Image (cartoon, coloured by chain):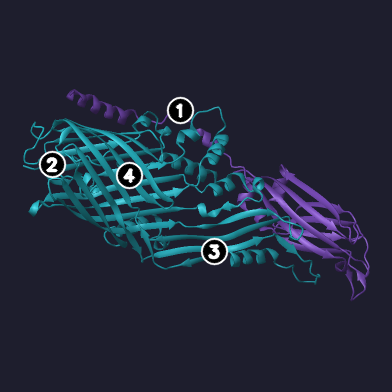
Amino acid sequence: MNTNLAIPLLGFLTFLLFTSCIKDTDFDQAYDIALTPEVELDLIYFNLRARDFYDTITSSSILTVRDTTDLRFLDDGEIQDNLRRAEFFFEFTNTIPRNFNVDFQFLSEANDTTYTTQTQINSGAVGSPVVTEFIENIEGDAIADLTRSFKVVVSVTIPSSSATLEGELDLKSKTTYYLEF
Amino acid sequence: MRNLIILFIAFWADAAIGQNKQVLFGLEEVPQNIMLNPGSKVPQKSHYGIPFFSQIHINGGASGVSTFDIFGKSAVDINTRIENKLYELTDKDFFTATQQLDLINFGWTGKSKLFYSGGIYQELDFIFYFPKDLAVLAWEGNREFIGYDFDLGEISTTGDFMTVFHFGVNKQINSKLTAGVRAKIYSSMFSFKSTHNSGTFTTELGDENSPNVYEHKLQNVDISVETSGYASLRELDGAGEVTSEILGRAFFGGNLGVGIDLGATYDISNRFTATASILDFGAIFHTKDVENYRARSSYTLDGIELIFPPIVDGQGTLPYYEDLEDEVEREVPIDTLHNSYTQMRPVKFNAGLRYSFGKPTDGGTDCNCYNMSGGVSRNQAVGLQYYSIFRPKGPQHAATIFYYRRLFNFLSAKATYTMDSYSSSNVGFGIVTDLGKFNFYVAADNLQSYGNLAKAKSVSLQLGFNLKIDRE
């Protein structure tokens, strides 16, 4: 029995206490940590009918219909700081035998225009819908414009309409937000 | 946000421990051994812990990941390492921190050779399971996971900060059997728990009948958080007020609970000894200062529908966005409740089998002729120990082999090798000295990691000072 072990053991424990350390690590790497989530989120949708472009009371065409919704999250501080790119995807399904112009006008809370984009929709026919896809990619300096936005005004313009015009124009849309925290 | 994540990872991997005190269990020279087994053999006549220093225990650990895994110097980009780890971890992986501090601890031999012990200690116990799906969602977003059900039920965490008042009795019933029991009163100063949650979040590609491109679905969500001792803190101003309020609850001012510890030691032969104990079999009844939150919902988000109302001069557009916010608040309500709740303490189970050999330590004979069947204290022992603790997602286990050696009359040591949820190679070591009436012990595990703590997935340390008076 080697009772002299006691001294080495005590020494060993003391050694541990004084030598325990954290090494081969580089906590500066923390500054390189970047979360880069890519978030898919529905945006707006609508279902316009041909008769929405004709006023039966006054028997006159309504060549432009317009609606507005807030998108308040866009000018949120977190989004302003961390949004790197946004890709808007719009899918129009048209059975109205007309082309359309669609304008998207983004406005700040004070109603200053921050960002605009527009697209043309191909004419369709009742019974044979025509799908028009439109992608708007926003990155770089334009992100700063987009993230000052508080609301969006959607204007749909038809070149001509009549009381007998039939069909529907549907929109489905989503945005992919490329974030970096 | 990024800072939060860094803090989280650093803490996840650094703070370490569970409640397993595998080195102290069965180490009879340490008076606080009786806290791990009220039915332990008690060699001393009495002991008086040095107030605030009789037992200091800290333990923290994370299963599955160490600081080194993330922050180690490497040619691989840190984000790639985090991402790899993210997919390697499961929702059964956890982070835990435990800390105990004896305020007072004492024991003495009374009439009929009953050994009484009592005291007060403060305990912090925290466990947080890794909510893998939510972490993936935060790290990656939902773009690559269209159609995948993110499980919100993986959220599971509990935390308790309490004072424990205890009093126990221990008796050597016959030459083979020693048994003991300890009653505990818990005074909870602060507590929260969120367990048994359920629900999923899914982003599905809509079909032709869907109004929009996607359907963002919350399905069967039922998530609750129960807190006690929290609501009243919100009203307070500054850390000083919060601290004094919490400490004010230490002495029966909080939510009370009761529990018991049971234990026994049985000498199978004069070389084999079996021990077992159950600790913290009890519950805390949270009735005061309770605030609970519960969200229950099944809801589908499609985006904002524009209906192009006829424009009337002077009239604004429809408040689509406010309506959507109202709808979400209505459909995904978070209720605040004040109903009492009961929280079971995490029950701990210890068992050991010890084989003693070497020289007898009580006089130099191999056989105590007055005690033919009872165990004989010898200067060496080996054995097995088992430990388990009941946690929200099921019990966690640890198995230990140990070697004990009494080096001198005044110095004993114990080495352990443990396999547990954190690692399969945990080496622990402890020493206890009796210098006159002065008793000191220190025990730590994961010693192989002390050369580089960053590689440790858990660390546990106990130390303490006592005055100990031996039997005549």
The disc placed on residue B47 is none
Q: In terms of sequence position, does the residue under pointer 4 or pointer 2 come before the other? A: 2
Disc 4: which chain?
A: B
Q: What is the letter of the cyan chain?
A: B
- The reply to whether residue A11 is in sight is yes
| Mark 4 in CB contact with mark 2 (< 8 angstroms) | no
- The reply to whether residue B54 is in sight is no
Disc 2: which chain?
A: B
Q: Is residue B151 left or right of residue A68?
A: left
Q: How far separated are the C-alphas under marks 4 and 3?
A: 37 Å
What's the residue type where badge 4 is placed? Tyr
Label 2 and label 3 in one chain: yes
- Residue A77, horizontal then vertical, whole percent: 61, 51
Crowding near the residue tagged with mark 1, few <14, some 14–19, many ≥20 C-alpha atoms within 10 Å: some
**Colour chain A is painted in:** purple
**Of B38 and B313, the residue lying toward us:** B38
**Residue position for label 3:** B296
**Of A147 and B406, the residue lying toward us:** B406
Kindly report which numbered mark, 4 or 2, lies closer to the viewer in this rendering: 2
**Residue position for label 4:** B387
- Residue B415, horizontal then vertical, whole percent: 27, 33
**Residue position for label 1:** A24
Query: What secondary structure is marked by label 2?
Result: loop
Kindly report which numbered mark, 1 or 2, lies closer to the viewer in this rendering: 2
Kindly report which numbered mark, 4 or 3, lies closer to the viewer in this rendering: 4
Q: How far separated are the C-alphas under marks 1 and 4?
A: 33 Å
What's the residue type where badge 3 is placed? Arg
Kindly report which numbered mark, 1 or 4, lies closer to the viewer in this rendering: 4
Query: What secondary structure is marked by label 1?
Result: loop
- Residue B271, horizontal then vertical, whole percent: 18, 36
